[in-house]
Image: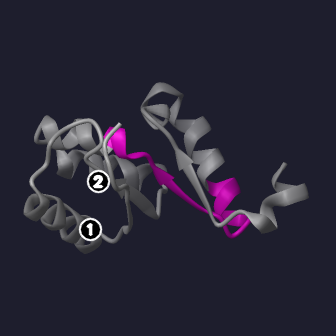
Amino acid sequence: LMNISGEYVDYLKFGWGTSIVHEQDIIKAKVEMYKNHQITPYTGGTLFELAYRSKKLEDFFAEAHDLGFPAIEVSDGSVDIPHEEKLECIELAKSNGFEVLSEVGKK
């Protein structure tokens, strides 16, 4: 699929908890394959929200780096995060070297 239409894809989201459900080797291989096609793979916001709620953002960032993700989604679609705290989370993610995508709205 990437050989046929990868040039039309800029970002690829690993939605929900995909990156923690599958074997790490599979996720790492997929992340590298997308990056080789100049596609930015990123973790979905639900996983960020789980880390935020559990007060484990640093662990989440470390795991995302270990898996090779250059970007993450910061969202508050399932949990309530005050706007200022969401902005702080975005800055924290950026200071940890991630490109940040942000979802707007609730599920």
Type of the residue with mark 2:
Phe
**Residue tagged 2:** 61
Q: What residue is rendered at 19% in x and 52% in y?
A: 58
State which quadrant residue 4 falls in: bottom right
At label 1, counting other C-alpha atoms closer than 10 Å, the crowd grade (few under 14, some 14-19, many 20 or more) is few
Q: CA distance from mark 1 to mark 2?
A: 7 Å
Is there a contact, CB below 8 Å, between mark 1 and mark 2? yes
The numbered disc on residue 38 is none
Residue 39 image point, x, y percent: 65, 64
In the image, what residue type sits under mark 1?
Asn
Counting from the top left corner in percent of width and height, residue 5 is at 85, 58
Residue 98 lies in quadrant: bottom left
Residue beneath disc 1: 96
Seen from the viewer's position, the closer of residues 32 and 73 is 73
Q: Which residues are magenta?
A: 32-47
In percent of width and height, residue 53 lies at 14, 37
Q: Residues within 10 Å of mark 2 (few under 14, many from 20)?
A: many
Compare residues 97 and 54 and report the one nearer the observer: 54
Q: How is the image coloured?
A: one colour
Residue located at (24% from left, 66% from top): 90
Residue positioned 65% across, 67% down in the render: 10
Residue at (26% x, 68% y) in the render: 96
Quadrant, the C terminus: top left
In the image, is residue 100 above or below residue 1? below
Q: Secondary structure at mark 2?
A: helix
Membership of 34 in magenta stretch = yes
Please name whichever residue, 60 or 52, is drawn nearer the observer in this view of the structure. 52
